[in-house]
Image (spheres, grey):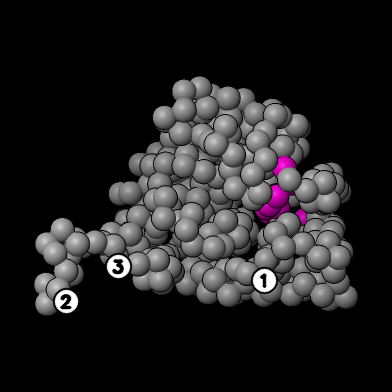
Amino acid sequence: MSTAFDNIISCGAALRNADPLIHCITSPIAINDCANVLLALGARPIMAEHPLEVAGITAISAALSVSLANITDARIESVMTAGAKAHEDGKRSCIDCVGVNCSPLRMDLARRYIQECRPAVIKGNASEIRAIAGAACGVTGIDTAVSDRVSRDNPGSVEAMAGILLDFSKHSGAVVLASGVIDMVSDGKHVWTVENGTPRMGLVTGTGCILSCMTAAYLSVASAPSDAVLYATALLGIAGELAEEACTGPRDAADGLSASARESFAGLGSFHVGLIDALSLTGAKEFAKRARIGLL
């Protein structure tokens, strides 16, 4: 195992040993799952978002995650106040640029946050990252546009995204994560790919918010922000794979199903629960065996 991979994989035990308080300003749609995931990983979540308390909460927290999902006037103020406090105190933050490609309000907020609060990590899907980086992008709500998808089936897409990530990371001073079928990460010097996960993860609301909060948690203990991003991204993908495997298999013949139907998927509710189960149980050995992290 290389020293670089050692640094990535060490994030898991480091978080459980540190038991840090992580401040998350995220979508109310995903707050419950985000909090439960952080508890499962060994962190202590706090989801404060009132403008009059977020500076104080950030001051006692180890790292900050902010999301532009489901934005409100109060959340805009809270995001900027908490981000400014994190920057002032030298604490790492992660911004999830949800919907910046389809909302001028969110784009303006993301740019202000990046310029004034200097986050350690900027996250978004491929379309969102292309938009915030100033590249041409598709617009289809908060999902990645078909034209922007990065996959082995889309020739040149990996190389094109790598160039965008490198330039934007250098310009912003942050590690940049573009999530998708192939997750891609750059620290301005290197570009990595992470190829863990399953398409079913996109059918569970809030997995993007979960990844942002996981990233912030690992930012609090990682030696380098890129280690935190790579560990969080690969771990969530691995958990998705394990959850899918646990939900797929033979079912009781007595239920009247045909032989082919008995080899079936248990359902998205079971997958949802299985995802959190897998996150709570996946250790260093399973991570090392299953992580598909590549350096371009």
Label of residue 68 in the image: none
3 and 2 marks in contact (CB < 8 Å): no
Residue linked to disc 1: 28
- Using residue 12 as the reference point, say whether residue 140 is left or right of it: right
> Looking at the image, is mark 1 or mark 2 earlier in the sequence?
1
> What is the CA distance from the residue labelled 1 to the residue labelled 2?
38 Å
Residue linked to disc 2: 255
Instruction: Give x and y (percent) for residue 117.
Output: 82, 51
- Using residue 183 as the reference point, say whether residue 171 is left or right of it: right
Magenta stretch contains residue 97: yes
At 64% across and 50% down in the image, what residue appears?
A: 142
Which of the 4 quarters of the picture holds residue 270?
bottom left
Identity of the amino acid at label 1?
Pro
At 40% across and 46% down in the image, what residue appears?
A: 196
At 54% across and 63% down in the image, what residue appears?
A: 205
- The vertical placement of 88 against 183, above or below, is below
Q: Name the mark nearer the viewer: 1 or 3.
A: 3
Which of the 4 quarters of the picture holds residue 90?
bottom right
Residue linked to disc 3: 266
Would you call the spot at circle 2 few (<14 residues within 10 Å), some (14-19), or many (20 or more)?
few
* Residue 13 visible: yes
Span shown in magenta:
90-101
Would you call the spot at circle 3 few (<14 residues within 10 Å), some (14-19), or many (20 or more)?
some
Identity of the amino acid at label 3?
Ala
Instruction: Give x and y (percent) for residue 86.
Output: 78, 60
Q: Name the mark nearer the viewer: 3 or 2.
A: 2
Instruction: Give x and y (percent) for residue 85.
Output: 83, 62
